[in-house]
Image: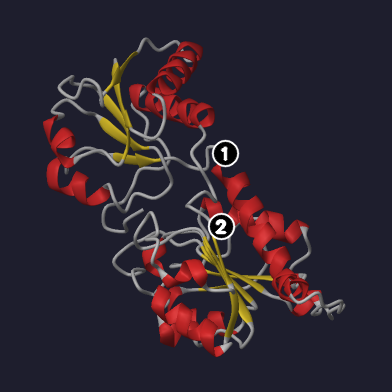
Amino acid sequence: MRLAVWDVDEPFRRWRDALIQHAGELRLAVQVIDACADPDAQADFALVWHPPAQWLAGQQQLRAVFNLGAGVDALLPLMRAHLPEVPLIRLQDAGMGRQMADYVAEAVLRAYRRMDDYAALQAHATWEPLVLPARGGFRVGLLGLGQMGLAVARRLQALEFALLGCSRSGRQPDGFDFPVYAADGLQEFLAACRVLVVLLPLTQSTRGLLDYASLSRLPRGAYVVSAGRGAVLCAEDLLDLLDQGHVAGATLDVFDTEPLPADDPLWRHPRVRITPHVAAQTLVGPAAAQVMRKIAALERGESPGGVVDPDLGY
């Protein structure tokens, strides 16, 4: 079978070597094509990250397309337009959950231990021990309880933080016992969060969800950690609430426009920390192994995990 890889951010040889290795372990014979270098070559399966619409439209033999990341919001419209009958399959964790848990845990601990306050004191050579909030009352709210959200929940539970969650369905995840709100309980959920962790996918219902009215529901002095999709959160409204002191600080990894423009005021706000969409990066080895396992399942006539529901958007 022929696998086409479109990923301008990663050397093709890394994908080729990893895919061939894991195909061999599964006794699958594969030919791996560098689609960026040979865009006219046809394939049975495509592994892509931000492919051009023209290339997708030219692929007439694809049995499935694998998105080389957790979020499919950029790819889904292209699939609807050009390959509406071809399944779109996303990665499920593939090493990203541990990275996301590390990222969020650092941000939560920084907020809890008041490290931004100490940085401000250091700037003025001020020696002043600060009182910590009660850990049990320092509730961390997880907005989004997919695989990334549950990886974060496990890490924060191990750190003994009180948790609550909010998801579309409001279902209690297996193995957890913290309160979970459904989508219609968002405002009540926000009012209970000392730290809001945003891990939602970008869909029609989540775009702009966290606007001024919603973010104002957070308790005064709350922190925001955004690591899902940037367009879920209205940055201008967040800046207003930061300037008012209602939101104490924010750690932002994702943005509506990426890279974040150099003149964006977020860069210069003293209570905002910015990272360049690195909270959970695709790891070639685990991702290639997962893709090949999913292809093997398709070859057996089975439905693999991670098939995207176009109506839900994830």
Instruction: Name which quarter of the figure residue 209 lies in.
Output: bottom left
Q: Is residue 255 above or below residue 132?
A: above
Identify the amino acid type marked 1: Gly
Rendering coords of residue 33 (x, y %): 29, 18
Lower sequence index among marks 1 and 2: 1
User: Where residue 123 sits in the image (x, y, percent)?
Assistant: 73, 72
The picture quadrant where one finds residue 48 is top left
Could you tell me which secondary element the residue under label 2 belongs to? helix
Viewer-nearest residue: 9 or 19: 9
> For mark 1, does the 10 Å Cα neighbourhood hold few (<14), some (14 to 19), or many (20 or more) residues?
some
The answer to which quarter of the image holds residue 222 is bottom right
Residue drawn at (37%, 35%), measured in percent from left and top?
Answer: 303
Element type where label 1 sits in the image: loop
Badge 2 crowding class, 10 Å Cα cut-off, few under 14, some 14 to 19, many 20 or more, is many
Disc on res. 149: 2
Q: Amino acid at mark 2?
A: Gly
- Which colour scheme appears in the figure? secondary structure
- Residue that numbered label 1 is attached to: 95
Q: Provide residue 291's location: percent of width, then percent of height.
A: 42, 29
Residue drawn at the location 53% of the way across and 82% of the way down = 242
Q: Is residue 170 visible?
A: no
Left or right: 135, with 306 as reference point? right
